[in-house]
Image (cartoon, grey):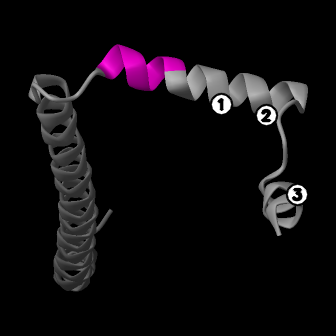
Amino acid sequence: MDPALLIPILALSIPIVAIWTKHQQKLAEMNIQTTAQATAEQAAQYASKVQQLEDRVQVLERIVTDKGYDVATQIEALRDQRRVDDEGTGVPLGTLNREKA
């Protein structure tokens, strides 16, 4: 191959390679930016969820440590109410008011 022919080919290929390299760099920067935004959104969601869980734990700690609160009695009351609801026993509240009137 003639060296004189290589010079114009080389002269034309340098700008093409430079443009392609710059384009690849922009794509990489856009990818990094997109990943950073997604990560920031996830971090904000996790922080919000953690705050909600911490608030719930604080409420539960207050309930358990409150001296006037009887957890076992409350649990049993809920069980008794569930049993009444499941069995359909008990008197509906509406009929009590009509019988007294």
Contact, CB < 8 Å: mark 2 with mark 1? yes
- The residue labelled by disc 2 is 85
The picture places residue 24, in percent across and down from the top left corner, at 25, 69
Q: Is residue 30 above or below residue 48?
A: below
The picture places residue 37, in percent across and down from the top left corner, at 22, 68
The picture places residue 33, in percent across and down from the top left corner, at 19, 70
- The residue labelled by disc 1 is 81
Which image quarter is the N terminus in? bottom left
**Distance between the alpha carbons at the discs numbered 2 and 1:** 6 Å
> Nearer the viewer's eye, disc 3 or disc 2?
3
Task: Identify the magenta region.
Answer: 71-76
- Badge 3 marks a residue whose secondary structure is helix
Q: Is residue 10 left or right of residue 99?
A: left
Q: Earlier in the sequence, mark 3 or mark 1?
A: 1
Crowding at mark 2 (Cα within 10 Å: few <14, some 14-19, many 20+): few
**Distance between the alpha carbons at the discs numbered 3 and 1:** 18 Å
Q: Amino acid at mark 2?
A: Asp
- The residue labelled by disc 3 is 95
Q: Amino acid at mark 1?
A: Gln
Q: Nearer the viewer, residue 11 or 43?
A: 43
Q: Is residue 1 left or right of residue 62?
A: right
Outermost residue, front side: 101
The quarter of the picture where residue 18 lies is: bottom left
- Badge 1 marks a residue whose secondary structure is helix
Q: Earlier in the sequence, mark 3 or mark 2?
A: 2
Instruction: Tell me if residue 97 is in the magenta stretch.
Output: no
Crowding at mark 3 (Cα within 10 Å: few <14, some 14-19, many 20+): few
